[in-house]
Image (spheres, rainbow, N blue to C red):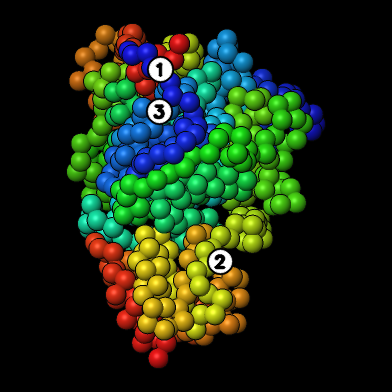
Amino acid sequence: MSGELMVQDHPMDGLLRADRLPHIWCPGCGLGSIMSCLANAISESGTAPEKHAIVSGIGCTGRVAGYLKLDSFHTTHGRAIPFAIGLKLANPELKVTVFSGDGDLFSIGGNHFLHAARRNVDINVICVNNFNYGMTGGQCGPTTPTGARTTTTPFGNSEPAFNLPHLAASLGAVYVARWTSLHVRQVHRSMLNALRKPGFRFLEVISPCPVGFGKSNEIGEGLDEMRMYRTNSVVDPDADLQDAGIDMQKESPIVLGDFVDIERPVFVPSGVDIA
Amino acid sequence: MVTAEAQPRVLTGQHFMNGDIACAEGALAAGCTFFAGYPITPSTEIAERLSRRLPELGGVYVQMEDELASIAAVLGGSWSGAKAMTATSGPGFTLMMENIGLGVMTETPCVVIDVQRGGPSTGLPTLVSQGDVMQAKWGSHGDYEPIAFAPASPQEMFDLTITAFNAAERFRMPVFVMADELIGHMTERVTIPSKDRISIVNRKRVPPGSENRLFYAPDEDLVPPMPIAGDGHAFHVTGLTHDERGYPAGDPLVHDRLVRRLTHKVQIAEKELSQVEELMTEDAEVVVVAYGAMSRSARQAVTLARERGIKAGLFRPITLWPFPYRKLRGLANQVSRFVVAEMNLGQIAREVERHLRRPATWVTHAGGRMIPPEEVLLALQETAR
């Protein structure tokens, strides 16, 4: 090593808090590349970065808010969506993105997701799903596949898991997509689509958590899980979402695609025409 | 869609209105532009009034799915620059404690109205109590110094809601109005002054275009100017312990410095915040401490005691937190006997004894009814003996 840097800057440095890097995520985690996709999408969204705001809950994914050089809010566990709603309603000019994990958005924050989708509030929700609570050391959550081993399901998870695109679509989300952290081009494109559309938009990104989930479920390291995404992924935008659940078994498909893209009246907080 | 013929923001004039409505009007007069809430007796009339009034004035009224979401939306609204509030009662106040802590830690101005009812749990949904006053002090985890006011009339519901907004903006934190069912549902004359006679405080803002990146570096009053979302600052806000940039910091020294500043900013302003009413205390030999609705009964008890030749007085904390201990101690130089009357089993009584460093006579009831003046009178008579 000559000590000479090959690259001085990250291409997204303008949207990253370089003074906070390196980030806290483990080797093999998908969050870094997914965050990069969002930074790219924001820079291409046609809305100036100062009019974007990002809101996170708690957990590994919740830390994304701290690394993006935007107005960024790292809130309480599960409450990113209602906080984002307040931010958006009080300043409709803002493009508000919620970026949080599966446990945060669908366990402790599940009720808020239901109602925000039902109302069709104008916010963009990105859920990074790693099938467990990573920050606290790999516990079972509402997306943990049945049978999976976690630190709190030593005999295998006895519960069924949420099928997130099916849930979001059934609630009336106007945009629903799912990709994995391997599919960076598709993630980037879906994020861009979502940023350019009004209403309640939902993107699930499947991500490896080798430390919390991969190792204990015979998936292996992050790279092994990425290989699994490559071999098992089935891109099917017309899939029956009822059948799009994920069990992370060796031979099981991971159904991906841009599933829903519809129009629905966007939530306005009162029926008064303030003309 | 309906087109509203808007009434003015400040309804200057004489009114006959209940405390909850007066509170809503006080909020509007203070410049409230954002309400998020969830229906709960006995505070619901505040939400109902604002659901009609706020949209007409170009503000935002939103009913959320629960109180957890309501206070979260209020904090979000505040960071978009709104003067934001919610209104609730005991069970909802308990749910809000989580994000009240976030509001304290992130220094987010907002107002929370708690129209108290009997607890614990669902308790007495339609009946009065003062059982949440210590929850206002200690309800969220960790150390903080809350600001809370206790109105004793519909007029004070109006006045103190304005005071609460001004304090929230001045100190950048959630501020509580600790009302109760009796005051919320009591109808009395309320005088709303003209707009120019209402003093309004607005938060210090980081001006757009500012180069300052130390968003949590305080001014001399220990309060940092607040950046507003969309102004181009790219600021970070976190409930984690943070340094002056707003970045997470795991250092115990940073934590201690931050939490001390958050408490000191209120403590150093105790004098400015502290409001009390004293009635016939000049020559008093025994004084009853009472606040909120209970002070009305205590006031009557003082009159009855005087008629019986007992030199009784009333000390009414209008500011509950920070507790007006200096004024109480000042009174204790001249009076040695104290009675505390409250509609809980002795919450402020402990605070009074702590500051007096001597026992007081407690007149307590768990809630559901106002303690009648005769019971307070009895305690005054026995204590004066």
Q: Which label sits in the foreground, 1 or 3?
A: 1
For the residues beneath circles 1 and 2, the answer to whether they share a chain is: yes
Q: Toward which corner of the image does residue B206 lie, by quadrant?
A: top right
**Mark-to-mark CA distance, 2 and 3:** 35 Å
> Which residue shows up at 44% across the image and 24% down it?
B7
**What residue is disc 2 on?**
B324
Residue type highlighted by circle 2: Pro
Residue B224: where, in percent of width, then height?
Answer: 68, 44
Circle 3 marks a residue in which chain?
Answer: B
Residue B218: where, in percent of width, then height?
Answer: 71, 48
Residue A275: where, in percent of width, then height?
Answer: 45, 11
Q: Nearer the viewer, residue A204 or A108?
A: A108
Residue A134: where, in percent of width, then height?
Answer: 42, 43
Residue type highlighted by circle 3: Arg
State which tag comes first along the sequence, 2 or 3.
3
Q: Nearer the viewer, residue B274 or A52?
A: B274
Residue A134 vs B360, above or below: the answer is above
> Which residue shows up at 69% across the image and 52% down it?
B222
**What residue is disc 1 on?**
B5
Residue type highlighted by circle 1: Glu
Circle 1 marks a residue in which chain?
Answer: B
Label 1 element class: loop
Residue A87 can be seen in this image: yes
The reply, left or right, for residue B264 in relation to residue B380 is right
